Image: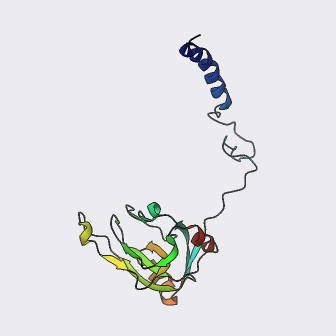
């Protein structure tokens, strides 16, 4: 038997085995329950715990769900392209080693607050940055450099640090997860 002939003989049973192992497709509409609860989908077991709440950062009189950005490609995007930033969301740029950082508004459509933080949440510097004019060349988009090395940079909706009282207090309350993020972050 030639190698090509053997392949044709083996391939159909192998393909059938692979498709059989994928499992049955989920039902299009699960049967309704009499207690008013929603039936679990094929991806959710009835005993699965709810997803954990996202970590939060304390901003004066408010808190916001914080998304940590630990790696270069994620940090390069930030809030760029967003037409709205909610009061209860923030980005925390996390770096392993302290260094002078500079942020700019390339691709940003709405004002944002940028705060350079000490590891304990003390606000070292902050500024509300405005979006550049449409079509601005990269060289014409201003940078906001830190005056000293930092590992943490917080971004929120423009004006939020002032409105919440975090600017007056001079600090934000960081979630306990920050210690682990600092260890896992690159650079």
Q: Is residue 83 above or below residue 3?
A: below
Say whether residue 32 is left or right of residue 80.
right
Q: Position of residue 111 (x, y in %)?
A: 36, 72
Residue drawn at (42%, 79%) of the image: 100
Residue drawn at (37%, 61%) of the image: 81
The total number of labels drawn is: 0
Quadrant containing the N terminus is top right
Quadrant assignment, res 176: bottom right
**Farthest top residue in view:** 1
Relative depth, front residue between 29 and 132: 132
Q: Position of residue 57 (x, y in %)?
A: 57, 75
Q: Position of residue 181 (x, y in %)?
A: 59, 69
Chosen colour scheme: rainbow
Q: Position of residue 88 (x, y in %)?
A: 52, 70
Residue drawn at (61%, 65%) of the image: 54
Relative depth, front residue between 157 and 98: 98
Quadrant assignment, res 115: bottom left
Q: Is residue 32 above or below residue 129?
A: above
**Farthest front residue in view:** 2
């Amino acid at each position: 038997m030639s190698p090509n002939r053997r392949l044709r003989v083996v391939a159909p049973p192998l393909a059938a085995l692979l498709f059989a192992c994928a499992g049955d497709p989920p039902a299009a509409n699960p049967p309704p329950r009499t207690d008013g609860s929603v039936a679990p989908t094929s991806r959710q077991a009835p005993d699965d715990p709810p997803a954990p709440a996202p970590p939060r950062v304390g901003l004066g009189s408010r808190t916001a769900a914080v998304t940590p950005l630990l790696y270069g490609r994620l940090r390069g995007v930030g809030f760029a392209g967003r037409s709205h930033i909610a009061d209860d969301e923030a980005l925390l740029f996390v770096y392993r080693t302290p260094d002078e950082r500079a942020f700019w508004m390339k691709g940003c459509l709405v004002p944002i607050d940028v705060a350079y933080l000490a590891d304990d949440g003390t606000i070292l510097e902050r500024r509300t940055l405005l979006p550049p004019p449409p079509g601005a060349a990269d060289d014409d988009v201003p940078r906001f450099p830190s005056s000293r090395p930092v590992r943490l940079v917080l971004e929120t909706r423009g004006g939020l640090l002032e409105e919440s009282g975090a600017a007056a207090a001079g600090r934000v309350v960081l979630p306990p997860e920050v210690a682990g993020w600092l260890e896992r972050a690159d650079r």
